[in-house]
Image: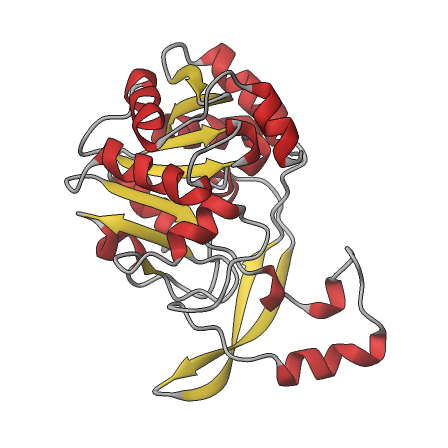
């Protein structure tokens, strides 16, 4: 969607103030632990682009809350498995050997959208250490959310997702669907069904030196997340608040309720 389309979709521009009002109307509260998945283009034309959205989110949760966003870096996944596009086979070892180390403070996100990338760059944002599935956070609980992010099973029990769960956090889907909802991955780890396992390695900095860390994980799958989300909204009344933020459809989701529901749903539907 181009900028002309964004202008044509709305009667007035969205601003930090109007977006903050919309977020409060949806149910975002001061003190919330809020994990955000967003699409800037879905909001219509925003005065100030992604920065205005980040500022509105910060104002909505205030300094007493904690704002969290995925800061994933697909450029550090296994290049042998890349498909969109794939790289030639004889490039794979060069990519593995020559890509610079992941640096939480400076490595750009990939495929996370303009709002998450903007948030990552704020000076008071902190980021977890995982080279492929890091999270960025800001606010009262930010350091605790991103601390001690395990390399193994990076979206599992020793991840920021589990910390958001323990804090009774909520998920904001801002112009996005359940297919982007990383919290459902936490349920994949917790549910009892057969899982394939993978191994990856990526370069990181250790005391200023480039080292390659190897870590194990499960093969995650988002193909049924939309179906699961629809079942959750039907089966758990009151767990989702729906509304409009800017021009975007928005959902405010009880994260622990979603994860608990998804565990049972996976065990019933992924045999």
Q: Is any part of residue 157 visible from this angle?
A: no
Image coordinates of residue 118 in percent, x first then y, are 43, 51
Q: Relative to residue 196, is residue 238 drawn left or right?
A: left
* Quadrant that contains the N terminus: top right
Q: Residue at x 25, y 43 (%)?
A: 66
* Quadrant that contains the C terminus: top right
Decide which of 148, 115 is in the foreground and name it.
115
Image coordinates of residue 60 in percent, x first then y, are 25, 31
Q: Relative to residue 172, is residue 38 drawn left or right?
A: right
Q: Residue at x 34, y 23 (%)?
A: 18
Q: Is any part of residue 204 visible from this angle?
A: yes
Image coordinates of residue 175 in percent, x first then y, are 52, 28
Q: Relative to residue 86, is residue 27 drawn left or right?
A: left
Q: Residue at x 30, y 16 (%)?
A: 25
Q: Quadrant of residue 90?
A: bottom right
Q: How many callouts does the rendering have?
A: 0
Image coordinates of residue 203 in percent, x first then y, are 53, 78
Against 62, residue 213 (above or below) is below
């Amino acid at each position: 969607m181009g900028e002309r389309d964004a202008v044509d979709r709305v009667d007035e521009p969205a601003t930090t103030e109007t977006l903050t009002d919309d977020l409060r109307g949806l149910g975002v509260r001061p003190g919330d632990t809020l994990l955000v998945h967003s699409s800037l283009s879905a909001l219509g034309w925003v005065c100030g682009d992604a920065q205005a959205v980040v500022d509105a989110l910060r104002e909505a949760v205030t300094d007493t809350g904690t704002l969290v966003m995925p800061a994933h870096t697909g450029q550090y996944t296994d290049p042998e498995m890349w498909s969109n596009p794939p790289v030639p086979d004889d490039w794979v070892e060069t990519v593995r050997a020559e890509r610079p180390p992941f640096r939480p403070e400076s490595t750009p996100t990939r495929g996370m959208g303009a709002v998450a990338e903007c948030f990552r760059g704020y000076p008071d944002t902190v980021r977890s250490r995982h080279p492929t599935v890091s999270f960025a956070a800001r606010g009262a609980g930010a350091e605790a959310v991103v601390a001690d992010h395990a390399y193994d099973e990076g979206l599992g029990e020793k991840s920021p997702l589990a910390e958001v769960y323990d804090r009774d956090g909520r998920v904001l889907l801002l112009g996005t669907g359940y297919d982007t909802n990383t919290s459902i991955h936490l349920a994949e780890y917790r549910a009892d069904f057969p899982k394939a396992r993978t191994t990856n390695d990526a370069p990181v900095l250790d005391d200023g030196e480039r080292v390659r860390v190897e870590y194990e994980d499960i093969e995650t799958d988002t193909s049924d997340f939309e179906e699961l989300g629809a079942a959750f909204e039907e089966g758990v009344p009151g767990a989702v608040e729906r509304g409009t933020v800017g021009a975007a459809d928005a959902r405010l989701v009880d994260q622990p309720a979603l994860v608990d529901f998804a565990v049972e749903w996976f065990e019933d539907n992924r045999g």
